[in-house]
Amino acid sequence: MAPVSATPGRAEASTMARALREAVLAGIIAFGLFVLYVGLKTDQNISNELILVPRPGLLAIFVGLAMVARFLGVLYIQPAMKRRRDAKSAAADLELQPSYVKRNFSTIAIIALVLYPPLMVALFGTQGSLKWVDNFGIQILIYVMLAWGLNIVVGLAGLLDLGYVAFYAVGAYSYALLSTHLGLSFWVLLPMAGILAALWGMILGFPVLRLRGDYLAIVTLAFGEIIRLVLINWTEVTQGTFGISGIAKASIFGIYSFDVGAPNNFAKVFGLPMSAAYYKIFLFYVILALALLTAFVTIRLRRMPVGRAWEALREDEIACRSLGINTVTTKLTAFATGAMFGGFAGSFFAARQGFVSPESFVFLESAVILAIVVLGGMGSLVGIAVAAVVMVGGTEMLRELTFLKAIFGPDFTPELYRMLLFGLAMIVVMVLKPRGFVGSREPSAFLHARKSVSSSFTKEGHG
Amino acid sequence: MAVAPVMKPAASSADPILKVEHLSMRFGGLMAINDLSFECRRGEITALIGPNGAGKTTVFNCITGFYKPTMGMMTLRQKAGKDFLLERLADFEINKRAKVARTFQNIRLFTGLTVLENLLVAQHNTLMRASGYTILGLLGFPAYRKASKESIELAKHWLEKAALIERADDPAGDLPYGAQRRLEIARAMCTGPELLCLDEPAAGLNPRESLALNTLLQGIRGETGTSILLIEHDMSVVMEISDHVVVLEYGQKISDGTPDFVKNDPKVIAAYLGVEDDEIEEVIAEVEEVAHEVEEGGQK
Amino acid sequence: MEYFVQQLVNGLTLGSIYGMIAIGYTMVYGIIGMINFAHGDIFMLGGFAALIVFLALTSLFAGVPVVIALLVMMIVAMIMASLWNWTIERVAYRPLRGSFRLAPLITAIGMSIALSNFIQVTQGPRNKPIPPMVSSVYNIAGITISLKQILIIVITAVLLSVFWYIVHRTPLGRAQRATEQDRKMAALLGIDVDRTISVTFIMGAALAAVAGTMYLMYYGVVVFTDGFIPGVKAFTAAVLGGIGSLPGAVLGGLLIGLIESLWSAYFTIDYKDVATFSILAIVLIFKPSGILGRPEVEKV
């Protein structure tokens, strides 16, 4: 064994050498990548001409960071990940009893969400809770609901839809237009917006269902853009880029209103001090209920023939047809159901903002929603909710990082980096977990015991 | 080419379940099937055999609606006496209305669904009606719950027949090859077909799996009276279980009759082995020997 | 009539730019079957590289001839874009090769978001205008053609010929086509698949960078969001022409350029993108594989 004992040391040395080599290489590449874009900045001078401002210091920081990251990566992170993988494959045979929290995750999460607004009020006061309930709570729940809606189309039926935001827009504008012109209330228009969006889902879905895979993706993207462009250009109705403002607020089923002037104003009736927080808290519960409705319907549908047909469609369309399943209507129902939830979310969005404009319905939104579905693990409601919290909540958090100003100077605006970091996070999560946070699939029926299906068997659809 | 030789006509039955008449299928310049006519009799197992590229799977695809034939008529007569012209039905209606089910040469299971779920998907149309096209089921009406229970019972029945009951909750993609073949047949049976079309059900099976398959097929015919049309390369399977054999070569029928008749038809032997006419005698002797050995092998 | 020809010229110019970007989409799609959503942003990066080089050249060497300036801009932009696309493929796509189909699509979308925001952060959110570089205009039979337009069309034609030569006449092109047909088999036959894919990304990026340079020269302005709309249009062009087909990409690009300029000329400019996308949808509904795409045969 004597000669062997020398090897660890040598191996370490060679790893070190490799790490150094890789770091230098990474530095060279980083220099190449960033020399123009970081090393030089295009700026306007006083006479409005573009000039170049060199930033050698910043470039050096970028290159340095790349080198250090690569060095540490080769030296520590790669071996650590390899060890973890080995450990995991060794432990894979053990049947692990899921922990209490894991087993009752949904119940715990729902209770926590119901308690969330009062907790925030208790912690930050009525006015202080506004941010936490609105920016975090409502914002995240809207994305959760949208992603759960899109999950029906992408995750269950395996149809790649890159224009989901179109249905969100249809819902929002349905509410905005019908409430300002006809004066109908939120609770009448909510189902109507859903139905209208579902109708649009069918209208747009019908011609494209023959298409497969990426053709379907590009046509749905095109439809999303068409709807947005029509909203921009059809100024007589939509007021174009100015958008529609002064949209009526939702009321508590017509009993209490949140309009400041109304006699049945919620705060007035209960003798509370005026605050926007009540409306936000109310909206929080509305969107929570809507999201839970989406989840409930999805869970229910998965155990019904139509839901099973969706999943079967994702697995093998030809086999579906051989079993007498009408694939056209099956796809259409998936499109329409997904669109309906998009429409619900859209009308909620309009009621919350009091203002809609085409700005809110750009492709980026579709991309973010799709990213949440895929990052969460297609088909898994819990995974998708977690992904929404991480991605949307995480980027919202950036707005809160004002202390960074102390480090980087007063000009530093963390919001600017929000989407940059969002994009990078999408890449990192996907590379580390290609199947999303929850990769396995829960079967919709069982004979002896419910066993989740490993992601290596499920397919992702071709349509 | 000489005039088609007189062949022993397959005893024309009064009650064919499927009548294929003058079927032709052209792909561009290629005539994959040329004026093919044959019958499948009710309650029997009909085998469609022929060398590679003879057009067997194309015939299947025409019958089950995946291809629209260039010409010809395919009439399916159900037990109740209702006739369907298969070439006029959309692909999914051939299963839904005409009650023809099929399996595929390269197995097409829903690999990410469990074995049980595969069988439940097959009962889609029944369950759809029972669930009031989703709406009643979504509201939790008892009729759907009852239908749902029955569907699981039916699935259980076929799982037992296919000897898969133990694996009911495993993903279909996790089953061994032979079990996947049986599952695909069980799934087709769950649609309640009158005619079951099997595309090379024994391909790639080991002898034990082959035996299990034969049991399943015999069981299906004996118990449900479902007629079976199958494509097969494995002569032992064909000779053992089929009642009637149709032989194709280059998209045309070259022989049609009982297994014994077909086995000894010189044209069939020539097609399979590609020999001169004067060597046929020799070949027949050889084939009989082989068939005998195969039979013995099967009995072991 | 002159007006029509005038619009035709404008459309061809625009279409050339789209076509050059579309080739990158179509090649990457052909070889690894993914939509490289970040490709539009590579085009934008190319435009920015050209802009920065232009500013550097004009400030360092005041009287540099336009031809040299353009050439240097183009070459540097090609190098930059290639380096970026190569790195992106290594970091964000290669680890996901062979896994889940949607994973690389999501990283590509993430990459697109990250790239445009990276430029926003490092170069600022404002439009970046440059003084006109090439301003000669010719008047031929009542039609005005600017030198810019001639340059763009000629450069596109030259580059496409070079490109066509590489793909169809060199070992590298052969490796690409083989990898496209069957990646596993190509690897077994000794083709370095990873390298071939990298080269494909580099080639696509180089063309996109040229398109970016042309775009900057033609419009005289570039902004960090410029990757999206031309990117989507070019992708639309690739799909319209039949994704995976090189002539299809160019044809699609030209068609989209023509549709856009003719629609703007004869109808309303507001709805030009609606027209483009509608025509895409209509074409795909009637010819689901695009104009020059091979129809996808459904194997049963």
Image: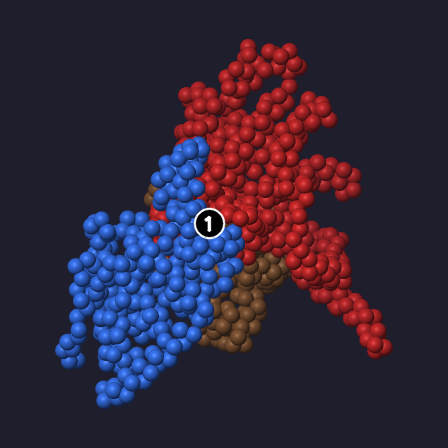
Chain colours: A red, B blue, C brown
What amino acid is labelled 1 in the image?
Glu
Which residue is nearer to you in this view: A83 or B297? B297
Q: Nearer the viewer, residue A392 or C122?
A: A392
Where is residue A94? Give x, y as percent.
67, 55
Q: Compared with residue C192, is residue C232 higher up or lower down, i.e. above or below?
A: above
Quarter of the figure that contains the N terminus of chain A: bottom right
| Residue C172 to residue A174: above or below | below
Residue B212 quadrant: bottom left
Q: Residue at x 52, y 22 (%)?
A: A250
In-image side of A309 versus A274 (left or right): left
Secondary structure found at label 1: helix
**Residue at label 1?**
B117
* Depth check, front residue: C1 or C22: C22
Query: Which residue: 63% across, 39% down?
Result: A105
Left or right of A454 in this view: A83: right
The answer to whether one can see residue C23 in this image is no
Residue B61 position in % (x across, y down) = 31, 61
| Residue at (62, 15) in percent of width and height | A267
The chain that hosts pointer 1 is: B
Q: Position of residue A307 (x, y in %)?
A: 45, 43
Question: What is the crowding at mark 1: few (fewer than 14 residues within 10 Å), some, or many (at least 20)?
Answer: many
